[in-house]
Protein backbone atom coordinates (compact mmCIF):
# COMPACT_ATOMS: atom_id res chain seq x y z
CA UNK A 1 0.00 0.00 0.00
CA UNK A 2 1.40 3.43 -0.91
CA UNK A 3 2.06 5.80 1.96
CA UNK A 4 -0.58 8.53 2.17
CA UNK A 5 0.32 12.23 2.23
CA UNK A 6 -2.03 15.21 2.55
CA UNK A 7 -0.82 18.57 1.18
CA UNK A 8 -1.55 21.96 2.76
CA UNK A 9 -0.51 25.21 1.08
CA UNK A 10 -1.54 28.82 0.69
CA UNK A 11 -0.26 28.62 -2.88
CA UNK A 12 1.11 32.14 -2.72
CA UNK A 13 4.01 31.85 -5.17
CA UNK A 14 5.86 29.84 -7.80
CA UNK A 15 7.76 27.92 -5.12
CA UNK A 16 4.49 26.47 -3.78
CA UNK A 17 3.70 25.09 -7.24
CA UNK A 18 7.21 23.76 -7.75
CA UNK A 19 7.11 21.85 -4.46
CA UNK A 20 3.80 20.21 -5.32
CA UNK A 21 4.83 19.44 -8.90
CA UNK A 22 8.20 17.98 -7.90
CA UNK A 23 6.72 15.75 -5.21
CA UNK A 24 3.94 14.56 -7.53
CA UNK A 25 6.52 13.81 -10.24
CA UNK A 26 8.62 11.67 -7.91
CA UNK A 27 5.55 9.79 -6.70
CA UNK A 28 4.51 9.06 -10.30
CA UNK A 29 8.04 7.89 -11.11
CA UNK A 30 7.95 5.50 -8.17
CA UNK A 31 10.85 7.29 -6.46
CA UNK A 32 8.51 8.00 -3.54
CA UNK A 33 6.27 4.98 -2.78
CA UNK A 34 3.30 7.12 -1.81
CA UNK A 35 0.30 9.12 -2.95
CA UNK A 36 -1.11 12.59 -2.33
CA UNK A 37 -4.65 12.03 -1.06
CA UNK A 38 -5.74 15.68 -1.10
CA UNK A 39 -4.55 19.25 -1.50
CA UNK A 40 -5.89 21.88 0.90
CA UNK A 41 -5.57 25.60 0.17
CA UNK A 42 -6.65 28.38 2.53
CA UNK A 43 -7.47 30.57 -0.47
CA UNK A 44 -10.41 30.13 -2.79
CA UNK A 45 -10.52 30.88 -6.49
CA UNK A 46 -10.57 34.57 -7.33
CA UNK A 47 -8.63 35.72 -4.24
CA UNK A 48 -5.17 35.95 -5.82
CA UNK A 49 -3.54 35.17 -9.16
CA UNK A 50 -0.82 32.96 -7.64
CA UNK A 51 -3.19 30.80 -5.62
CA UNK A 52 -5.42 30.43 -8.69
CA UNK A 53 -2.40 29.10 -10.58
CA UNK A 54 -1.71 26.72 -7.69
CA UNK A 55 -5.30 25.43 -7.79
CA UNK A 56 -5.04 25.09 -11.58
CA UNK A 57 -1.94 22.93 -11.12
CA UNK A 58 -3.62 20.70 -8.54
CA UNK A 59 -6.52 20.21 -10.95
CA UNK A 60 -4.16 19.42 -13.85
CA UNK A 61 -2.47 16.77 -11.71
CA UNK A 62 -5.85 15.21 -10.95
CA UNK A 63 -5.59 15.81 -7.22
CA UNK A 64 -8.56 16.12 -4.87
CA UNK A 65 -8.64 19.80 -3.86
CA UNK A 66 -10.26 21.37 -0.80
CA UNK A 67 -10.46 25.15 -0.37
CA UNK A 68 -11.54 27.19 2.66
CA UNK A 69 -10.78 30.91 2.61
CA UNK A 70 -8.96 32.19 5.68
CA UNK A 71 -9.32 35.75 4.39
CA UNK A 72 -13.10 35.53 4.24
CA UNK A 73 -13.60 33.59 7.47
CA UNK A 74 -14.90 35.85 10.25
CA UNK A 75 -12.62 38.85 9.55
CA UNK A 76 -14.09 40.79 12.47
CA UNK A 77 -13.04 38.05 14.92
CA UNK A 78 -9.59 37.90 13.37
CA UNK A 79 -9.07 41.59 14.14
CA UNK A 80 -10.51 41.30 17.64
CA UNK A 81 -9.07 37.99 18.89
CA UNK A 82 -6.55 36.30 16.62
CA UNK A 83 -6.01 33.30 18.90
CA UNK A 84 -9.72 32.50 19.02
CA UNK A 85 -10.03 33.08 15.29
CA UNK A 86 -7.20 30.61 14.73
CA UNK A 87 -9.02 27.98 16.81
CA UNK A 88 -12.34 28.47 15.00
CA UNK A 89 -10.84 28.63 11.51
CA UNK A 90 -8.83 25.46 11.98
CA UNK A 91 -11.85 23.71 13.43
CA UNK A 92 -13.37 24.29 10.02
CA UNK A 93 -10.21 23.00 8.34
CA UNK A 94 -10.29 19.83 10.46
CA UNK A 95 -13.91 19.18 9.52
CA UNK A 96 -13.00 19.42 5.84
CA UNK A 97 -9.93 17.15 5.97
CA UNK A 98 -11.41 14.60 8.41
CA UNK A 99 -11.88 11.94 5.68
CA UNK A 100 -8.08 11.92 5.25
CA UNK A 101 -7.04 11.55 8.89
CA UNK A 102 -4.90 8.51 8.03
CA UNK A 103 -2.63 10.70 5.87
CA UNK A 104 0.53 12.47 7.02
CA UNK A 105 -0.06 16.16 6.41
CA UNK A 106 2.73 18.06 4.64
CA UNK A 107 2.79 21.84 5.09
CA UNK A 108 4.41 23.22 1.94
CA UNK A 109 3.99 26.98 1.86
CA UNK A 110 1.06 27.04 4.30
CA UNK A 111 1.31 30.57 5.69
CA UNK A 112 -0.97 30.34 8.73
CA UNK A 113 -0.01 29.37 12.27
CA UNK A 114 -2.03 26.28 13.14
CA UNK A 115 -4.28 26.02 16.17
CA UNK A 116 -3.00 23.94 19.12
CA UNK A 117 -5.96 21.60 18.65
CA UNK A 118 -5.03 20.79 15.06
CA UNK A 119 -1.40 20.22 16.08
CA UNK A 120 -2.60 17.60 18.54
CA UNK A 121 -5.19 16.04 16.24
CA UNK A 122 -3.07 15.35 13.16
CA UNK A 123 0.56 14.41 12.48
CA UNK A 124 1.94 17.20 10.32
CA UNK A 125 5.39 18.04 9.01
CA UNK A 126 6.75 21.40 7.94
CA UNK A 127 9.81 22.84 6.23
CA UNK A 128 11.76 25.41 8.26
CA UNK A 129 14.74 27.14 6.59
CA UNK A 130 17.19 26.73 9.47
CA UNK A 131 19.14 23.98 11.17
CA UNK A 132 17.78 22.32 14.33
CA UNK A 133 18.26 24.79 17.20
CA UNK A 134 18.86 27.51 14.61
CA UNK A 135 16.89 30.77 14.27
CA UNK A 136 13.10 30.72 14.13
CA UNK A 137 10.82 32.92 12.06
CA UNK A 138 10.67 33.66 8.34
CA UNK A 139 13.56 32.92 6.00
CA UNK A 140 14.36 36.64 6.03
CA UNK A 141 14.64 36.57 9.83
CA UNK A 142 16.79 33.43 9.73
CA UNK A 143 19.30 34.82 7.23
CA UNK A 144 19.51 38.11 9.09
CA UNK A 145 20.43 36.27 12.29
CA UNK A 146 22.96 34.08 10.49
CA UNK A 147 24.75 37.12 9.11
CA UNK A 148 24.68 39.12 12.34
CA UNK A 149 26.06 36.10 14.22
CA UNK A 150 28.64 35.36 11.51
CA UNK A 151 27.48 31.74 11.38
CA UNK A 152 29.64 29.06 9.78
CA UNK A 153 26.82 26.88 8.45
CA UNK A 154 23.13 26.89 7.77
CA UNK A 155 20.58 24.51 6.32
CA UNK A 156 16.95 23.53 6.67
CA UNK A 157 14.87 20.91 8.42
CA UNK A 158 11.60 19.10 8.17
CA UNK A 159 10.04 18.96 11.61
CA UNK A 160 6.91 17.73 13.30
CA UNK A 161 4.42 20.56 13.76
CA UNK A 162 3.63 21.40 17.37
CA UNK A 163 2.15 24.42 19.14
CA UNK A 164 5.74 25.65 19.68
CA UNK A 165 6.55 27.53 16.47
CA UNK A 166 9.45 26.03 14.47
CA UNK A 167 10.54 23.86 17.39
CA UNK A 168 8.81 20.51 16.86
CA UNK A 169 10.84 17.27 16.84
CA UNK A 170 13.21 17.17 13.86
CA UNK A 171 12.51 14.57 11.17
CA UNK A 172 15.22 15.33 8.60
CA UNK A 173 17.71 18.10 7.88
CA UNK A 174 20.60 19.16 5.69
CA UNK A 175 23.46 21.64 6.19
CA UNK A 176 25.94 23.55 4.06
CA UNK A 177 28.79 26.00 4.83
CA UNK A 178 28.36 29.75 4.38
CA UNK A 179 31.98 30.69 5.11
CA UNK A 180 34.74 30.34 2.52
CA UNK A 181 34.29 29.51 -1.14
CA UNK A 182 31.84 31.72 -3.02
CA UNK A 183 30.75 33.31 0.26
CA UNK A 184 34.20 34.57 1.29
CA UNK A 185 34.35 37.78 -0.80
CA UNK A 186 31.01 38.99 0.54
CA UNK A 187 32.02 38.45 4.16
CA UNK A 188 35.26 40.39 3.52
CA UNK A 189 33.38 43.35 2.02
CA UNK A 190 31.21 43.53 5.11
CA UNK A 191 27.64 42.24 5.06
CA UNK A 192 25.00 44.66 3.85
CA UNK A 193 21.37 44.23 4.93
CA UNK A 194 19.74 42.16 2.16
CA UNK A 195 22.89 42.61 0.07
CA UNK A 196 24.79 40.03 -2.06
CA UNK A 197 25.67 37.80 0.91
CA UNK A 198 22.03 37.69 2.04
CA UNK A 199 20.82 36.66 -1.42
CA UNK A 200 23.59 34.12 -1.98
CA UNK A 201 22.64 32.35 1.26
CA UNK A 202 19.00 32.44 0.17
CA UNK A 203 19.82 31.08 -3.29
CA UNK A 204 21.82 28.15 -1.94
CA UNK A 205 19.10 27.35 0.58
CA UNK A 206 16.30 27.41 -1.99
CA UNK A 207 18.25 25.08 -4.31
CA UNK A 208 18.14 22.44 -1.58
CA UNK A 209 14.51 22.80 -0.45
CA UNK A 210 12.88 20.64 -3.15
CA UNK A 211 15.49 17.87 -2.70
CA UNK A 212 14.95 17.95 1.07
CA UNK A 213 11.17 17.64 0.81
CA UNK A 214 11.32 14.93 -1.88
CA UNK A 215 13.92 12.92 0.03
CA UNK A 216 12.02 13.33 3.31
CA UNK A 217 8.80 11.99 1.77
CA UNK A 218 10.80 9.09 0.36
CA UNK A 219 12.40 8.34 3.76
CA UNK A 220 9.01 8.43 5.50
CA UNK A 221 7.26 6.33 2.85
CA UNK A 222 10.04 3.73 2.98
CA UNK A 223 10.00 3.57 6.78
CA UNK A 224 13.50 4.91 7.36
CA UNK A 225 11.87 7.43 9.68
CA UNK A 226 8.39 7.42 11.20
CA UNK A 227 6.18 9.45 13.52
CA UNK A 228 4.34 7.91 16.44
CA UNK A 229 2.70 9.56 19.45
CA UNK A 230 4.47 12.83 18.75
CA UNK A 231 7.91 11.22 18.48
CA UNK A 232 10.24 10.70 15.54
CA UNK A 233 11.53 7.12 15.26
CA UNK A 234 14.12 5.36 13.13
CA UNK A 235 13.53 2.10 11.23
CA UNK A 236 14.13 0.11 14.42
CA UNK A 237 11.54 2.05 16.41
CA UNK A 238 14.13 3.99 18.41
CA UNK A 239 13.69 7.72 19.02
CA UNK A 240 15.62 9.78 16.50
CA UNK A 241 16.96 13.32 16.81
CA UNK A 242 16.60 13.97 13.09
CA UNK A 243 17.91 12.07 10.08
CA UNK A 244 20.72 13.88 8.23
CA UNK A 245 20.07 13.96 4.49
CA UNK A 246 22.98 16.28 3.68
CA UNK A 247 24.84 13.77 1.49
CA UNK A 248 21.65 12.69 -0.28
CA UNK A 249 20.64 16.30 -0.95
CA UNK A 250 24.06 17.08 -2.44
CA UNK A 251 23.89 13.93 -4.58
CA UNK A 252 20.43 15.02 -5.78
CA UNK A 253 21.89 18.38 -6.80
CA UNK A 254 24.68 16.65 -8.70
CA UNK A 255 22.07 14.65 -10.61
CA UNK A 256 20.00 17.77 -11.38
CA UNK A 257 22.58 20.60 -11.31
CA UNK A 258 20.50 23.37 -12.87
CA UNK A 259 17.56 23.56 -10.49
CA UNK A 260 17.85 20.68 -8.04
CA UNK A 261 14.99 18.95 -9.86
CA UNK A 262 14.36 17.35 -13.21
CA UNK A 263 12.92 19.38 -16.05
CA UNK A 264 9.38 18.24 -15.36
CA UNK A 265 9.31 19.78 -11.91
CA UNK A 266 8.46 23.34 -12.73
CA UNK A 267 4.83 24.36 -12.98
Image (tube, grey):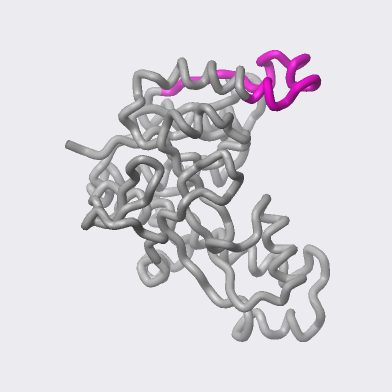
Picture residue at 73% right of the left edge, 71% below the top: 147
Residue 163 in picture, x, y percent from top left: 57, 39
Q: Judge from the rendering whether residue 80 lies leftward or rightward of residue 117; answer left or right.
A: right
Q: Which residues are magenta?
A: 65-86
The answer to whether residue 211 of the structure is visible from this angle is no
Q: Magenta stretch: residue 81 in it?
A: yes
Give the image location of residue 46, x and y in percent.
63, 19
Does the stretch in magenta take in 80? yes
Vertical position of residue 180 compared to residue 264: above or below: below
Q: Quadrant of the N terminus?
A: top left
Q: Nearer the viewer, residue 261 or 104?
A: 104
Percent x, y of residue 56: 49, 28
Q: Nearer the viewer, residue 168 or 112?
A: 168
- Residue 111, compared with residue 256, is above or below; it is above
Q: Is residue 219 left or right of residue 96?
A: left
Q: Quick check: can you spot residue 158? A: yes
Amino acid sequence: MPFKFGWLSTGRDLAARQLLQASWNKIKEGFIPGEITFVFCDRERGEAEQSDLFLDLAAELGLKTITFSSRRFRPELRKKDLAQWRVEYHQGVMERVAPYKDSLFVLAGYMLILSPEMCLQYPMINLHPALPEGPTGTWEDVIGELISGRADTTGAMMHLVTSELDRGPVITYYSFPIQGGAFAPFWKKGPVEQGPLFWLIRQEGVRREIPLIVLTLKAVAEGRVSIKDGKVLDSNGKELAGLSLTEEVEEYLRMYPETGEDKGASA
